[in-house]
Image (cartoon, rainbow, N blue to C red):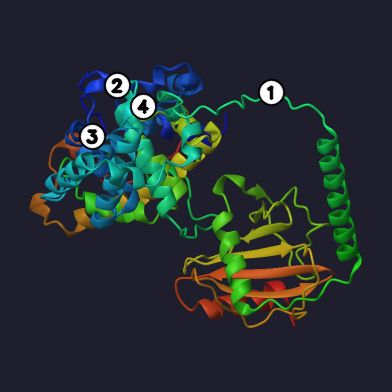
């Protein structure tokens, strides 16, 4: 999540300043990882507590937010005593699930996204959160997690496939439940000018 | 380039970041320039990614959270003793690139001691040390020569082992059922692996986990067979038992055959015991 970083000298860095500047970003990150408000609050607090211990060592101010994300990620992983089992082949990479277009009044909301996210295994959730929230490249994700980039690409593809599947299903249901008058009417946004449903999957390439 | 790799590259492109212009995406860029269908897939993927990203980042902290957080921070800043008592960051984290943002606060202190002269007292100490080590080695040798007691693991102990192994599994470490160590860790007389099944090492290569594909997987079924080379004799039945629940929600059962211990772990959202039985019957130990 892009946050404007204010320049500051190392001496002037105070925990309070960090909290005021970054608590919202860290909370969001923690919420996406943990999936509940209570856990996200705990994770955020824990992140800043640990940051407090290491504050005197901060040297590169422009990378503080990324450092805080890393602390949050580490705290999250430590808090996961039990992993959700994830099946051998239940993450199918299927480009057919990419919809033609989400209508502007996209019927999926953050709650629906979070439900889908909570169903992912931690290793997938981390990759996809770093991709969408931190906006890291797959190479940066590999460096951060110290895993091969091939693994990152595979995890990203599977996790995104799973999210798309969940969200598109929900979007389909949403658009079916909406009264006709509320359907998107712009040819550009609905895809009707091309004579097909906006959520019709497109054919995958050869 | 395979379709799968192309799709992975498409999924690796961040929305609105011009990733496609980067050298690592040159293969994809080339394919896009030649394939209009693929261009459409790419454009849709970026569009959907952007929509998802927007929702992904749209998280609002609960009201009053900032105040509560700042209040606790204020207490911290005015009470150094509290901070001292907090747990330290794991050392593993300090090896990550982020750790390099920081100075090495705690460099190991080199011993600043002159080498001592060898005195007769020191020689005596060395000899005494050697004698002690010899005694320890002899004790270990005798212990190894003694017949090992046969242990009978409890259901609870078995369930905990299986839970631990399931937790230790790493998604990145799965291998296809081609190069399986089937001679050292046979799956058993009746179980034939399919091409979709996969495996990985656990517990320092003393155990192999076979992850068996179940179709159709309508009930979230996961079936894993752990084959273990025991370090000491164990007493277990020769055929799969009815099984019992583990603390992490699996249904597990263990048996032994041909010097190997087999642990079957089954997960399902409903009727887990029935799923376990249905696996044991046709796939593990058919009548």
C-beta proximity under 8 Å, tags 3 and 4: no
On the image, numbered disc 2 is attached to which residue? Answer: A62
Question: What's the mark number on residue B114?
Answer: 1
Q: Residue B188's x, y, as percent?
A: 78, 68
User: Which of labels 1 and 3 is toward the front?
Assistant: 1
Cα separation, mark 1 vs mark 2, equals: 45 Å
Would you call the spot at circle 1 few (<14 residues within 10 Å), some (14-19), or many (20 or more)? few
Q: CA distance from mark 3 to mark 2?
A: 15 Å
Position of residue B10 measured from the top left corner of the image (x, y, whole percent) = 43, 31
Numbered disc 4: what chain? A
Q: Answer with left or right where residue B3 lies relative to residue A113.
A: right
Mark 3 or 2, nearer chain start:
3
Q: Residue at x 74, y 78 (%)?
A: B236
Q: Same subunit under labels 3 and 4?
A: yes
Foreground of the two, B185 or B111: B111
Q: Kindly indicate the quadrant of the structure image that contains residue B215.
A: bottom right
A64 or A178, which is in the foreground?
A: A64
- Say which mark, if any, is on residue A15: 3
Give above or below for B269 relative to A18.
below
Residue nearer the viewer, A177 or A23: A23
The 10 Å Cα crowd at callout 2, few under 14, some 14 to 19, many 20 or more, is few
The label number, if any, that marks residue A57 in the structure image: 4
Would residue A171 appear left or right of B275 to someone viewing this image? left
Q: Horizontal and vertical percent for residue A41?
A: 24, 51
């Amino acid at each position: 999540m892009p946050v404007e970083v204010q320049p500051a000298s190392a001496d002037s860095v105070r925990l309070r300043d960090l909290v005021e500047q970054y608590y919202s970003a860290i909370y969001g990150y923690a919420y996406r990882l943990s999936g509940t408000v209570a856990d996200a609050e705990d994770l955020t607090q824990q992140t800043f507590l640990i940051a407090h211990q290491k504050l005197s060592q901060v040297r590169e101010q422009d990378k503080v937010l990324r450092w805080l994300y890393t602390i949050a990620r580490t705290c999250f992983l430590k808090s996961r005593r039990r992993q959700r089992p994830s099946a051998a082949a239940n993450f199918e990479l299927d480009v057919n699930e990419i919809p033609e277009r989400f209508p502007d009044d996209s019927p999926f909301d953050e709650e629906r996204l979070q439900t889908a996210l909570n169903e992912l295994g931690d290793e997938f959730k981390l990759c996809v959160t770093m991709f969408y929230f931190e906006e890291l490249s797959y190479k940066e994700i590999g460096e951060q997690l110290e895993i091969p980039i091939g693994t990152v690409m595979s995890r990203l593809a599977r996790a995104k496939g799973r999210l798309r599947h969940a969200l598109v299903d929900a979007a389909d249901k949403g658009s079916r439940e909406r009264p006709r008058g509320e359907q998107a009417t712009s040819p550009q946004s609905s895809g009707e000018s091309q004579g097909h449903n906006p959520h019709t999957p497109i054919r995958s390439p050869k | 380039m395979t379709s799968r790799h192309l799709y992975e590259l498409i999924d690796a492109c961040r929305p609105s970041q011009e990733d496609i212009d980067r050298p690592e995406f040159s293969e994809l860029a080339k394919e896009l320039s030649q394939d209009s269908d693929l261009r459409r897939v790419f454009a849709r993927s970026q569009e959907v990614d952007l929509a998802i990203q927007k929702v992904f980042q749209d998280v609002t902290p609960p009201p009053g959270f900032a105040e509560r957080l700042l209040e606790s921070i204020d207490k911290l800043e005015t009470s150094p003793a509290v901070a001292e008592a907090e747990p330290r960051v794991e050392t593993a984290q300090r090896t990550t690139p982020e750790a390099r943002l920081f100075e090495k606060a705690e460099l190991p202190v080199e011993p600043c001691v002159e080498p001592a002269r060898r005195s007769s007292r020191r020689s005596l100490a060395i000899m005494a040390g050697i004698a002690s080590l010899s005694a320890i080695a002899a004790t270990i040798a005798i212990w190894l020569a003694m017949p090992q007691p046969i242990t009978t693991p409890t259901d609870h102990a078995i369930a905990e082992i299986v839970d631990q192994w399931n937790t230790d599994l790493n998604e990145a470490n799965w291998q296809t059922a081609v190069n399986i160590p089937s001679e050292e860790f046979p799956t058993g007389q009746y179980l034939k692996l399919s091409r979709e099944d996969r495996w990985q090492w656990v517990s320092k290569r003393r155990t192999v986990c076979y992850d068996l594909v179940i179709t159709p997987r309508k009930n979230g079924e996961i079936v894993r067979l752990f084959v273990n080379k025991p370090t000491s004799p164990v007493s277990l039945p020769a055929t799969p038992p009815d099984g019992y629940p583990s603390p992490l929600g699996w249904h597990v059962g263990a048996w032994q055959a041909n010097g190997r211990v087999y642990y079957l772990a089954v997960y399902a959202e409903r009727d887990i015991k029935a799923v376990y039985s249905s696996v044991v019957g046709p796939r593990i130990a058919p009548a």
